[in-house]
Image (tube, helix red, strand yellow):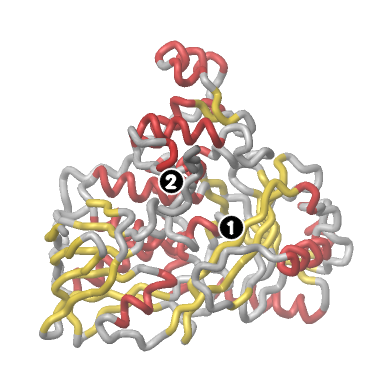
Amino acid sequence: MSTYRTDVVVIGAGAIGSAVARELSKYDLDVILVEKKEDVGGDASRTNSATIVSGYDAPEGSLESYLAVNSNPMFDRVTKELEVDFKRIGAIQVGFSKEDISVLKENEKKAIANGVMDVELISGDKVREMEPGLSKDIKAGLYVPRESIINVFDLLTAYVENAVDNGVRLMTSNAVQKIAAENGKVKAVVTDRGDIETKYVVNAAALHCDEIADTVGKRYFRNYPRKGEFFVLEKDLPYATARMIAPIPTPLTRGKLITPSIDGNLLIGPTAENIEDKEDKATTREGLDSIVEDIRKILPAVNPRDSVTQFAGLRPAREPAEYSIKAFDDLHGYIEVNGISQGVSCSLAAGVYVAKLLEENGLPLIRKDSYNPYRKRIKLFRECSEEEQEVLVKNNSGYGNVICRCEIVTEAEICEAIKRGARSVDAVKRRLRAGMGRCQGGFCGPRVVEILARELEIDPTQVCKNEKGSEMLWKINK
């Protein structure tokens, strides 16, 4: 196995780890981003509700509040730099009783204390004026205009693409086994594909942060999965809301939300179930039924028959529950990033926060003149005018071969995604939406496999859905 050398190793290419890597790429540093899966994006980050929160309901004075409130305005600039779709659609937290209204008033005070000053307490009639399909039983709402939606798959990919363009080395399918330390200092990161000698490590491994922390004696907490199940509903539904709609939160969760997606689907959920199995992403009848039951109290017309698909994601819950980003006096070079329940929303500020923490611990941050904050997204055929489409097809015949009919994804786009690092059917799906439509890959799936095999110069039986072991095809010997 090989031995590598670098200044900083970032463990985990979820939202936080990827944002940290991009932030560090601004400086004259050698950085390696290590991810055990075959693609970037982590687990929790790419299976969430694809929203950017304002931090209005975060605990006053907490690190959660600090990161969320400061990250939120950063997305306006960064999404333009990275060409990621982002919309400020706002949210309404709704209440049905006097007790609920008291909570809304407290949340209004909390929002103002957190620096989110543009919230507004509105009547039930005003709620229905803004969103006519909502229940007549709603008595009041808290309107939060800064709540936003984003193309989360593209954001996560863009963080890493831009970081790599600026010199970060990406190592996927590379599982970290332990951190090696000596005399109170980080020495190396040991992976299943070799050792990486380094003086600084950022442990942003989400659900597995505690396991890696254990290798250097810093497991004073426990990470466990909080499973959230979702429905993805059709586009252009007559009862779809224009804004995010949220119930009164519980101590465990923000509740089951109604969320318009950036691509036009309606997302409802999630559930919130604390489990132990860090790989359990199965949906359940009980969980999905509970989503429909609770959402219908808010949006009576919602219909599970409008579902395109369902999925479950795992959020990295923490015991004790807290946002934790810190260094340790007795282990120089080790940075813990853990318990971030709104990882996508907090990622930009967290990147800066971690960079400055590394600097405080002796890492020189010398800005590079060559740093380029911009990233060009893949040209999407479905978003082009007829005239633009004609030009694309004329210059590249692959744009004339539509592979995914539901989402209008062409061969040329898939080839570009593979060129940029997609190595599996799911990696193509996340970047381009091939397979996310009504047929769920029934038409385009075999064609995506064929293109992957051709472009990667591998046998079709080696093409995986995602991780090794999920091969799409089997060769039968007669």
Residue receiving disc 1: 49
Q: Residue at x 14, y 84 (%)?
A: 184
| Contact? badges 1 and 2 (CB < 8 Å) | no
Residue receiving disc 2: 79
Query: In what element is the residue under mark 1?
Result: loop
Q: Nearer the viewer, mark 1 or mark 2?
A: 1
Relative placement, left or right, of 292 versus 106 is right
Mark closest to the chain's N terminus, 1 or 2: 1
Q: Nearer the viewer, residue 141 or 364?
A: 364
Q: Nearer the viewer, residue 148 or 200?
A: 200
Q: Residue at x 25, y 68 (%)?
A: 356
Q: Residue at x 44, y 11 (%)?
A: 394
Q: Is residue 431 visible?
A: no
Q: Nearer the viewer, residue 413 or 445?
A: 445
Amino acid tagged 2: Thr
Q: Nearer the viewer, residue 99 or 407?
A: 407
Amino acid tagged 1: Ser
Q: Is residue 453 visible?
A: yes
Relative placement, left or right, of 456 versus 408 is left
